[in-house]
Amino acid sequence: MFDGATKVLTTLYYNSTGLSWLPDAYHRYTKFIPIFLIAFAASFLLTPIVGYLARKYDVVNDTQKRSRNKLNRFENQNRRINPNQYALLGGLGVIIPLLVLLALFIHPGAVTIPFIIGILILTAGGIVDDIYNLPATTAFIIQFLAALIVAISVVNITLINLPIYGILTLDSFIWKAEFLKIPLEFVFPGDLLMILWIVATINAVKWISGVDALMESNLIVTFLLLFILAIRFEILLVAVVSIIMAGSISGFTIFNLPPAKIGSAGTRATYGFIVAVMSIVNEAKVATTILILLLPFADFCFVILKRLALQKPKTFKDFLLLPVNIMRTSDSNHIHHQLLKLDFNVRQIVLIEVTVTMFVGSLAILTTEAYKFFYVIFGVFIIGLGILSIHMVSTKKEAKKKFKSDKETPESKYSY
């Protein structure tokens, strides 16, 4: 799977990182540091260029004062919580380094080609969405198409290990074919569940992007955890993709920290797609991935259930259109909206959700018996929790001081 470029990077790693003294067991993780740094640098350099082009051609976000809903008549402007205008198309600063580095490190094959085609479909759809603000149903069709491309590839879900029932087989029917020497395969009903999994993960990831750097910060943690799992189970494709994404999103996030100068926007669907597919390729560690993404999935399920409760279909036609109406609905019921209502600021919300993801992620790692990594991640979680607590206390004190100074008048200083 790796070519000569890996040998060059490995040599560079041993000669320059100063980590050759580590035990051999750690080198299988740390030898990917050059790939992370290259992805980080590529994204860091490319993102401002993408931002400049987006502003030049007026591809910017909607605000309460300015709407560019050329195609989406269902958009709800009241859910807008970012008053600042920033450039879109930012996801290109993440996806382009990924595609270039995949070409360098991964040979094309029956798994990688459908995976890359899915990325290209979603990225192209994201670009169009950034320019025209596509309706949710159109975006859903694009997501379904990308998921279908993977589902008819050799990537399959043939069984699920249920805690009580045991192993449930999902290969009642198998269809096989070949197209341009690429093997195709569809397993029923397993690959139907795969399509649902991919589409659900795409939207769960997308829906936590309501405030600056929230989705990106969560994804950095997610991809690093997927990288650890991939190395433990020796799935090199997942390891390479995960470490590239972690590095690339890190480089991008510098420009996305509040107040954001650029946003991932439509291309964020590609991030969720990559997470979903890599969890399947990663020895079907779907349950572990659900645990890592527990907060986004909990948010996703809560919003879907609330939208279902509000729809109240009265006729059979309304019932058939229920999925479409749910997709079209845009509201302010997400967790980050509720935290904003509780007077948390954007930075605090990012810290809260990333800290929760770190904690739950450490439990996910623990389920694979990676005890040392659990201690490390849990330690980072404790530190993050301490930083969050200090941040919240200092903000509260500052607000009290401001309130006291605003209440004070020149005369009150001399009153007795």
Image: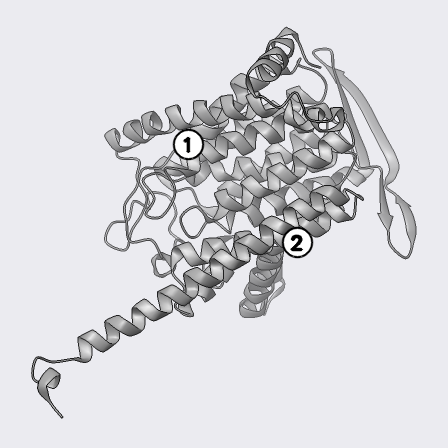
Under tag 1, what secondary structure? helix
Amino acid carrying mark 2 in the image: Val
| Residue 354: x %, y % from top left | 54, 51
Q: Is residue 320 left or right of residue 266?
A: right
Q: Mark 2 points at which residue?
A: 360
Circle 2 Cα neighbour tier, 10 Å, few/some/many (<14 / 14–19 / ≥20): many
Q: Which numbered disc covers residue 189? A: none
Q: Residue at x 44, y 62 (%)?
A: 390
| Residue 164: x %, y % from top left | 90, 57
Between 318 and 386, the one lying in front of the other is 386
Can see residue 293? no
Q: Name the residue under label 1.
A: 127
Between 177 and 415, the one lying in front of the other is 415
Between 231 and 412, the one lying in front of the other is 412
Amino acid carrying mark 1 in the image: Ile
Between 259 and 10, the one lying in front of the other is 10
Under tag 2, what secondary structure? helix
In the rendered image, which quarter contains the N terminus?
Answer: top right
Where 247 falls versus 18 (above or below)? below
